[in-house]
Amino acid sequence: MGQTFAEKILAKKAGVKKVQPGEIVEVTPDVALSHDNSAAIYGIFKRMGGDRVFNPKMHAIILDHAAPAPTTKHAENHYQIRQFVGDQEIPHFYDVGRGICHQVLVEEGLALPGELVLGSDSHTPHAGVMGAFAAGIGRSEMASIWALGNLWLRVPETLKIVVDGQLIDGVTSKDLALHVIGNLGADGALYMSVEWHGDGVEALDIAERAVLPNMTAEMGAKNSYIPPDQKVFDYLKERAKRPYEPILSDPDAQCAMVKEYDATKIEPMIACPHTVDNVKPLSEIAGTHVDQAFLGTCTNGRLEDLAMAAEVLTGRQLAKSTRMIVIPASAEVYREALLAGYIEIFLNAGAVVESPGCGPCMGNHMGVPAVGEVTISSANRNFRGRMGTKESEIYLANPQVVAASAVAGEIIHPKDLL
């Protein structure tokens, strides 16, 4: 019997021949990722008696959640982190403006095929787009890694998702992800290793693929993995910070569950308030009033996402009743969007373009809605209060639908714009 990706990589990192789901292993990550919460982790680290971090080169710290700092408290946290990074001589530090941690980790060639990435953020599975085992952990667990360099992990069962066929025009990987989450539910992959397979996944470019492991966190997955192929190797050719060895699951591996989807039958999908698995076809909720449109986040803030929205907005203006906020996922994306002319298109349409970071996605700043307002967003979560206001509503959609809805002032399919 063959082995799944999770079984193979965790056995390798634990230094044993084979592991089984449910088994506890002790592993040392290749990358330990944290962001603004590094200040809180530092406090735990000190209470543990920590002095020097285990292997400074292992750590990647990226300021993104409240960047630039919206309050004095956030600014003080950033100051403390900068001091810590300097004292500990941590080389992989990315200050305000570099972008969202998950995007930057991939761009900087720090998330590599066959490696183990542990991060103090729930969307750490994003790095599975590169063929890494990437999992979110708690702050205390990260403080332990800072101090000792290792952590216990339970070997997860595997959910294999097979996508056949290719998405039709106007349908994106965001719609595929929402369709799957709507089908399986918010706990449909609880503490599981999700593997994405099939020609429907292989046909996607890197930016589109990244949406899948990112959104799988919304099903409770421990990690989410796309087998690395030539597209990944080409992307990493000038980026990888070190040599890597891809790990592939065996075709005859035993999976706890296998789900198959036909990409050709998927239509634009919307996650309605107030849960990500409250998914409906766009056609069922078209006409819903929109006060704010938000394009960005680690889910859909890449150049390709901005390009989709720019195509919709070219020659058009936002509805008078609707505002639009655009936040590129990284400085690299921002620069490329500027050179491609997308930023000018957004500004001409009446949108606001902000500096790279998380901003309104988790309710810190740069787009917090008012009480009773409705936001359509390209983000990954829409639970009550996610954007900072409990008495507001968040709908999740693909970038094209977000842009079209900003023009119409209501949720609409781009093809239905006048």
Image: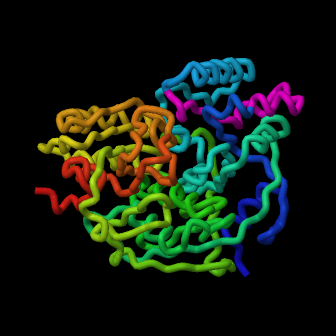
Residue 254 appears in which quarter of the rendering? bottom right
Quadrant containing the N terminus is bottom right
Q: Where residue 145 appears, x then y in whole percent?
A: 79, 41
| Residue 140 shown left or right of residue 352 in the figure | right
The one of 42 and 210 positioned closer to us in this rendering? 42
Q: Where residue 162 appears, x then y in whole percent?
A: 50, 75
Q: Exactly how many numbered labels are in the figure? A: 0
- Any magenta on residue 117? no
Q: Is residue 230 visible?
A: no
User: Residue sitting at 78 percent across and 36 percent down?
Assistant: 146
Quadrant containing the C terminus is bottom left
User: Residue sitting at 38 percent across and 64 percent down?
Assistant: 175
| Residue 148 shown left or right of residue 405 in the figure | right
Q: Where residue 391 appears, x then y in whole percent?
A: 46, 47
Magenta part of the protein: which range?
42-67
Q: Where residue 276 appears, x then y in whole percent?
A: 49, 61
User: Residue sitting at 26 percent across and 34 percent down?
Assistant: 343
- Any magenta on residue 58? yes
| Residue 263 shown left or right of residue 191 in the figure | left
Q: Is residue 92 above or below residue 402?
A: above
The one of 143 and 373 positioned closer to us in this rendering? 373
Residue 191 appears in which quarter of the rendering? bottom right
The one of 60 and 350 positioned closer to us in this rendering? 350
Q: Is residue 3 above or below residue 54?
A: below
User: Residue sitting at 54 percent across and 79 percent down?
Assistant: 259
